[in-house]
Amino acid sequence: MKAKIAAAPYLVWMVLFILVPLGVVVYFAFTTADGAFTLDNITEFAAYLPVFVRSLLFAVAATVICLVIAYPFSFMLSRMRLNHQRTVQMLVMLPMWMNFLLRTYAWMTLLENNGLINKFLALFGLGPLQMINTGGAVVLGMVYNYLPYMILPLYTVMVKIDQSVVEAAQDLGCNTLQMTAKVLMPLSVPGIVAGITMVFVPSVSTFIISRMLGGGNNLMMGDLIEMQFLGNSLNYNLGSAMSLVLMVVVLICMSITHVLGNEDVEEVM
């Protein structure tokens, strides 16, 4: 009884801020402006399929790049002295203390045609390169903003891996690649799964980065959804349908990732 009473505030919070908003989204997704039931909002989503595919591709690319960068960095961080670990952790988290919008504006200043990078290249007679308003700029912005969300879960798992396990694998003849594939990666699966989830979910639904760094030719689902609620379109029903489809796809991707992660953990055990 006491446990139920203690859990009551959390249950009320979940109902008010999760279930109720989700119910509102579902209601608008399957109704017209007059409140009549319809599936037209879902079927109309097919017209925006290229944007949806682009969002998935950009999010996957950003997630893979973050994983490739963060994995060796997290391992090296986990093997540093404790005081050095704290210093590097602070440096990793330092950009997160700055406003998200300001960080993205900074990249606009760097990547634009008259930006700092092109001015530097001009000293060597190179450029100007078209970096802003490209898909690569969008992926770069996502990698920069979400890389800490990949590093921290990986570090949390890797710091718990006993160094003697790594040394034993090396003594048994494993080179760096074999040791990583057969020892480190299976033991760090929970961190990989958590990092992929924390990077992929905000990447696939982002709209500020794609709008500021990608221009009008690299819109993502987040941009289209935002336009339905705040833009000239002002179509809550279609925007809710887009949000619902995106949410379902994200949940499916997360479920697949967690299932694969659990299988890897069971194989190690």
Image (spheres, rainbow, N blue to C red):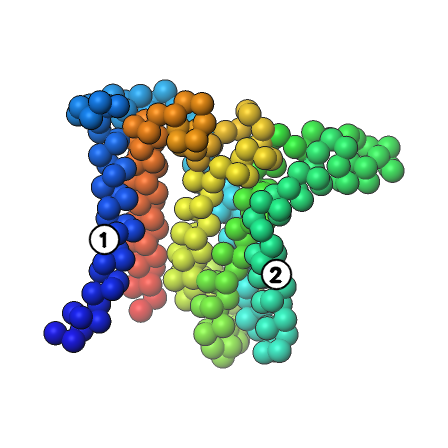
The residue lying toward the viewer, choosing from 264 and 140, is 140
Residue 246 x/y as whole percent:
34, 37
Residue 175 shows in this picture:
no
| Residue 46 circle label | none
Residue sitting at the far front: 34
Residue at 62% in and 30% down = 133
Q: Where is 12 relative to 60, above or below?
A: below
Kindly identify which residue carries mark 1: 15
Residue 94 x/y as whole percent:
61, 61
Task: Say whether disc 1 or disc 2 marks the residue closer to the N-terminus.
Answer: 1
Kindly identify which residue carries mark 2: 94
Residue at 59% in and 73% down = 86
Disc 1 residue type (three-letter)? Val
User: Which of the 4 image quadrants contains residue 238?
Assistant: top left
> In screen coordinates, is 248 left or right of 96?
left
The residue lying toward the viewer, choosing from 1 and 269, is 1
For the N terminus, the quadrant is bottom left
Residue 252 x/y as whole percent:
30, 43
Disc 2 residue type (three-letter)? Leu
* Contact, mark 1 vs mark 2 (Cβ under 8 Å): no
Q: CA separation, marks 1 and 2? A: 34 Å
Residue 223 shows in this picture:
yes
Residue at 54% in and 53% down = 147
User: Which of the 4 image quadrants contains residue 38?
Assistant: top left
For the C terminus, the quadrant is bottom left
The residue lying toward the viewer, choosing from 28 and 62, is 28
Q: Where is 255 relative to 13, above or below?
A: above
The residue lying toward the viewer, choosing from 26 and 197, is 26
Residue sitting at the far left: 1
SS for dot 2 = helix
User: Which of the 4 image quadrants contains residue 119?
Assistant: top right
